[in-house]
Image (spheres, rainbow, N blue to C red):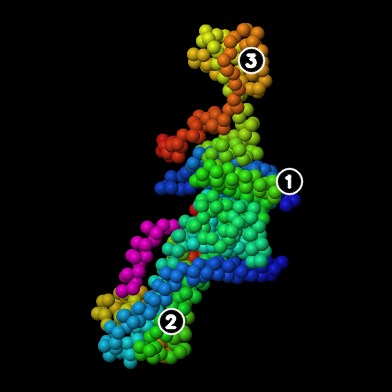
């Protein structure tokens, strides 16, 4: 009996997740403005910001600037793209979609997981595109390192999307959600070495950035792009990514299981 | 299904919900007992802020009660909320579809969350669109539909899994009179054609009167009366009798005759008009006509009027449901209660 019930629960989770995912994906793809903007963003970063770094490559200690720059932009995409997905949820909440899904027997986890999967798929498409655009401009990196980085980005994106949805479901208002995101995003961005490596920073700033887990994730992905798979930075970055993934997912699921009064 | 007939479709005892706002406990619903039988259309009537939606959200598993027990559609609300969700439909007052989605896809996706196959969901959805006068709107975006069409689309979503019990929260709020009358027709059809039990909330007296077999009146978080619209009106203390006489000096005589009717209240006299109240207005009217005739009173007009639900509400709560500032007043009462 127990196995049947748990099998039933698993198949329902998978089925409900797919239903929520397919609906979310279909609505995203049908929005042409969203499609153009989300595909153009990574391309613009590479085309308009990358060239600024080329003269600096010597200082960065890398053979070419894109090897340093692309992983950073990928992490940025993973975190900040995902953090903003909550705005869509607030709109859905206001239209009554969330509540109408919550009166169905669908698994609460599936309501979150389906949406997060959509975000991860979008993120991986954007990330792949970004890497492809950087190749003709001079990016050289091992395939394994690039794929491993994309996996890290997917995990990070899932974590931050879950957090974003949980916060959105708690605040239920763009007016409260936007300032909160802005307050978090800027310091985290500046202290992560995403745009320029923190090795360029003075000692005190490096010390401050050391407590930011994302800095270690960025450094880990830079090592991966360097083909250096066994160094401590890689494992630090990977470990912290998994930790953030677990924490973000726990936070999101907990919020979705609560009643949303 | 079999469990329903024993204890009714809804059987709730002492259902209560307390919110904490700024360290103050607000008893949104303070212990509600209610029973709904299969096939009934029951109206939950009360002013804004009376606790209608909170009660509905508890019965539909969206809010966990602070205390109390309930069986809904044969399942225990607390221990088996998923069972309840499987068996009920809920149409919220806030809508249920994304404005930029396609109407038909929203219905199918909603059905999929009940484990219904896409093919079956499409068949049922299209049938519901025909039944609800939404023909030809399958591919339309909800944002391009009229208010009445959108509300019917919400109802289609709430019915696609063929629930035996449907909750409608303020189904006609914001609709124009024609769309309201049309929606009433569809709600009656749910019961007549599908045998669906309907539990709806409303703050419109005419809606409760026109649509519901039975009305539960809720005020300040408690049910203050329950009965058919006719029962509730009879409880007010009778029908309203009005006699207009040709000569004002005979008004006193009419008032005396009216007061002598069995169970009558002391009538009020204004010039040539005498207004009183007596149970069973029809019979009282006939008796009064005979007496007036025998007494030789020259009558210009005579009528018996059923009390309105507003008279009912006024009698139960001491205030009129038509007062526009009802929510504000409730807030004031909460303030002074502290």
Q: Which residue is label 1 attached to? A: B6
Quarter of the image where one finds residue A163: bottom left
Going from N to C along the chain, the mark reached first, 1 or 3, is: 1
Secondary structure category for the residue under label 2: helix
Query: What mark, if any, has residue B288 been given in the picture?
Result: 3
Give the alpha-carbon distance from disc 1 to disc 3, as whole Å: 47 Å
> Which region shows up in magenta?
A169-190
Question: Magenta segment: does it hold A179?
Answer: yes
Q: Which residue is drawn at 47% across and 56% down?
A: A94
Crowding near pointer 3: few (<14 within 10 Å), some, many (20+)? many
B288 sits to left or right of A118: right
Which is in the foreground here, disc 1 or disc 3? 3
B188 sits to left or right of A182: right
Crowding near pointer 1: few (<14 within 10 Å), some, many (20+)? few
Query: What mark, if any, has residue A129 been given in the picture?
Result: 2
- The answer to whether marks 1 and 3 mark residues whose Cβ atoms lie closer than 8 Å is no
Name the chain under label 1: B
């Amino acid at each position: 009996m127990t196995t049947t019930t748990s099998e039933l629960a698993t198949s329902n989770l998978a089925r409900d997740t797919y239903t929520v995912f397919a609906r979310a994906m279909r609505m995203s793809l049908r929005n042409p403005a969203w499609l153009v903007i989300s595909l153009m963003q990574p391309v613009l970063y590479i085309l308009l910001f990358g060239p600024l770094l080329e003269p600096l490559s010597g200082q960065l200690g890398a053979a070419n600037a894109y090897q340093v720059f692309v992983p950073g932009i990928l992490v940025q995409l993973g975190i900040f793209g995902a953090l903003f997905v909550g705005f869509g949820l607030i709109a859905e909440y206001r239209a009554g979609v969330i509540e109408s899904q919550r009166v169905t027997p669908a698994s609460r986890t599936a309501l979150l997981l389906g949406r997060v999967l959509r975000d991860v798929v979008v993120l991986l498409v954007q990330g792949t595109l970004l890497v492809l655009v950087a190749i003709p401009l001079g990016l050289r990196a091992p395939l394994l390192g690039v794929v491993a980085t994309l996996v890290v980005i997917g995990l990070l994106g899932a974590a931050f999307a879950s957090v974003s949805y949980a916060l959105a479901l708690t605040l239920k208002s763009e007016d409260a959600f936007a300032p909160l995101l802005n307050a978090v995003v800027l310091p985290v961005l500046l202290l992560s070495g995403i745009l320029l490596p923190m090795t360029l920073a003075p000692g005190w700033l490096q010390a401050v950035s050391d407590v930011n887990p994302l800095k270690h994730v960025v450094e880990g992905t830079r090592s991966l792009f360097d083909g250096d798979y066994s160094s401590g930075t890689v494992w630090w970055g990977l470990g912290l990514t998994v930790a953030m993934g677990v924490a973000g997912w726990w936070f999101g699921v907990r919020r979705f299981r609560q009643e949303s009064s | 299904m079999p469990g329903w007939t024993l204890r009714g479709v809804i059987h709730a005892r002492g259902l209560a919900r307390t919110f904490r706002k700024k360290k103050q406990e607000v008893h949104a619903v303070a212990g509600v007992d209610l029973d709904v039988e299969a096939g009934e259309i029951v109206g939950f009537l009360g002013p804004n802020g009376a606790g209608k939606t909170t009660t509905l959200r508890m019965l539909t598993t969206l809010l966990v009660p602070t205390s109390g027990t309930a069986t809904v559609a044969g399942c225990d609300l607390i221990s088996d909320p998923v069972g309840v969700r499987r068996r009920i439909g809920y149409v919220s007052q806030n809508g249920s579809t994304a404005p930029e989605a396609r109407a038909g896809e929203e219905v199918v996706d909603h059905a999929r969350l009940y484990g219904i196959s896409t093919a079956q969901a499409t068949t049922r959805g299209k049938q519901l669109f025909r039944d609800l006068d939404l023909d030809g709107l399958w591919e339309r975006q909800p944002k391009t539909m009229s208010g009445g069409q959108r509300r019917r689309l919400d109802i289609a979503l709430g019915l696609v899994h063929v629930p035996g019990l449907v909750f409608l929260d303020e189904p006609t709020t914001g609709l124009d009179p024609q769309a309201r009358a049309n929606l009433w027709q569809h709600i009656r059809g749910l019961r007549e054609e599908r045998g669906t039990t309907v539990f709806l909330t409303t703050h419109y007296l005419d809606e409760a009167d026109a649509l519901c077999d039975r009305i539960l009146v809720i005020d300040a978080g408690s049910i203050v009366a329950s009965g058919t619209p006719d029962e509730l009106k009879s409880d007010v203390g009778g029908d309203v009798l009005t006699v207009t006489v040709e000569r004002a000096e005979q008004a006193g005589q009419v008032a005396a005759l009216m007061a002598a009717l069995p169970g009558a209240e002391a009538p009020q006299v204004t010039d040539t008009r005498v207004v009183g109240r007596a149970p069973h207005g029809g019979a009282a009217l006939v008796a009064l006509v005979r007496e007036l005739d025998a007494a030789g009173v020259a009558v210009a007009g005579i009528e018996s009027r059923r009390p309105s639900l507003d008279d009912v509400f006024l009698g139960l709560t001491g205030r009129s449901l038509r007062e526009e500032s009802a929510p504000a007043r409730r807030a004031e009462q909460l303030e002074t209660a502290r």
